[in-house]
Amino acid sequence: MIRYGQNTADAEGQSESQAPSDDHIAPAPRISIQAFCESVEAAGAMQGAAEDRRLARAHVRIQMGGMAAALEAYRSSPTPNVIVIESDKQGDGLLGALDELAEVCDGDTRLIVLGRFNDIVLYRELIKRGISDYLIAPAGTIAIVRSVCGLFSSPEAKPVGRVLAVVGAKGGVGASTVTHNISWAIARDFSLSSVVADLDLAFGTASLDFNQDPPQGIADAVFSPDRIDSAFIDRLLSKCTDHLSLLAAPATLDRVYDFGADAFDSIFDTLRATVPCVILDVPHIWSAWSKRVLISADDILVVAAPDLANLRNAKNLIDLLEAGRPNDRRPSYCLNQVGVPKRPEIKPADFARALEDDPVAIIPFDPAIFGTASNNGQMIGEVSSGHKTTELFRQLAQHMTGRTEAKKPRSMLSPLLSKLMN
């Protein structure tokens, strides 16, 4: 009997509660998916999956008719990379229909079945036949996304790194400074290997803030898409601390930085596969690539100053990104440069009312410590580890990574104290 593409499930299946969290679902590559649904509910869930950011590069086609429509379609047409079929058949009826479908399917086609019977014996028979996954209807959008994306993630592969994006609601609000300090806190306080990528190729400040002068950076990658792999990206990184590296912007004007929507995709895919945390310093511009970068990120932080233009822009950004990422956590925002003397400001409570959400942090205006850090090429925590703003950046790092607590630095006296306590 002709088998379908190799399944990725084990013999006992995997429950929803055992599956990885939504934030860590690896995006699918450029594949073709065809779904044959019998119910409106399944078609709706499939449509939601097609619109999910993790299937942004997949070509998805949905039609009604279930198994009968699939059999008819593939008698004279090649099969796609993935077929999703909803069926209300049970036992031998379902197995017989799938055997018939296998005869017209290409050998490398993956098949996901949406069934209505929670039957372990049936499940085992399906897996023996090479079915890639079996989901109990009604299957939700995230279950379908996880199932499809899981087909192209090797079980032996390292966990997929998270991509965090920080963007300013307006130019000059200090979004880059916030990004760099959050990155430094993630690396120091959680000992999490991270890369901060400066996407402002013309005017980026990451190399200045981290006191680095790398000869290469992100421009070398984005202008050489055919060369991108983990070894090439690794050569472009500049080491800032034991756990933090920088993918710097050239910050020169000798060329124009106009890119297509998918210009950074392969760079981020490579970083995801090799680094647990990637933090993107997204410039305040609106283009096809910047919109794509934000929508495809695992988590987003909008940095705003307490004035009317920032309020309007932050609301527009958050509303658009929330609509474009319906299966993800709502973008967060923080208020920066709060308390400038003699400047009329919108109160945080009014911001929260307009955005229907509280800011995750309120960073006070403190030109002395921020100016000192900037001029010295240091982070706030390096200038003053006990400063209240250092703690705010640690809390932001905790919020964006989902970490519950920071790793406490090990004292030189720890081994001695341990022996005395024992």
Image (cartoon, grey):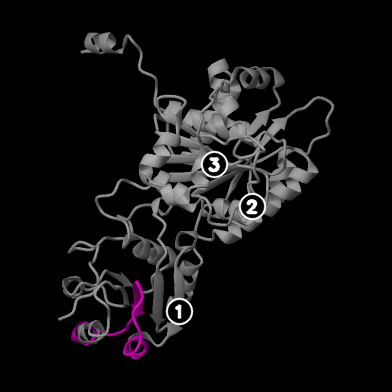
Rendered residue at 58%/31% (across/down): 206
Rendered residue at 22%/85% (across/down): 103
Q: Is residue 87 magenta?
A: yes
Give the percent coordinates (x, y) of residue 195: 46, 36
Q: Is residue 54 visible?
A: yes
Q: Amino acid at mark 2?
A: Ile
- Which is in the foreground here, disc 1 or disc 2? 1
Magenta range: 68-94
Q: Residues within 10 Å of mark 2 (few under 14, many from 20)?
A: many
Q: Is residue 190 above or below residue 167?
A: above
Which of these two is toward me, 146 or 83?
Answer: 83
In the figure, is residue 108 to the left or right of 63? left
- Which is in the foreground here, disc 2 or disc 3? 3
Question: Label 2, label 3: how many angstroms apart (C-alpha)?
Answer: 28 Å
Give the percent coordinates (x, y) of residue 408: 39, 22
The residue pinned by badge 1 equals: 62
Q: Residues within 10 Å of mark 3 (few under 14, many from 20)?
A: some
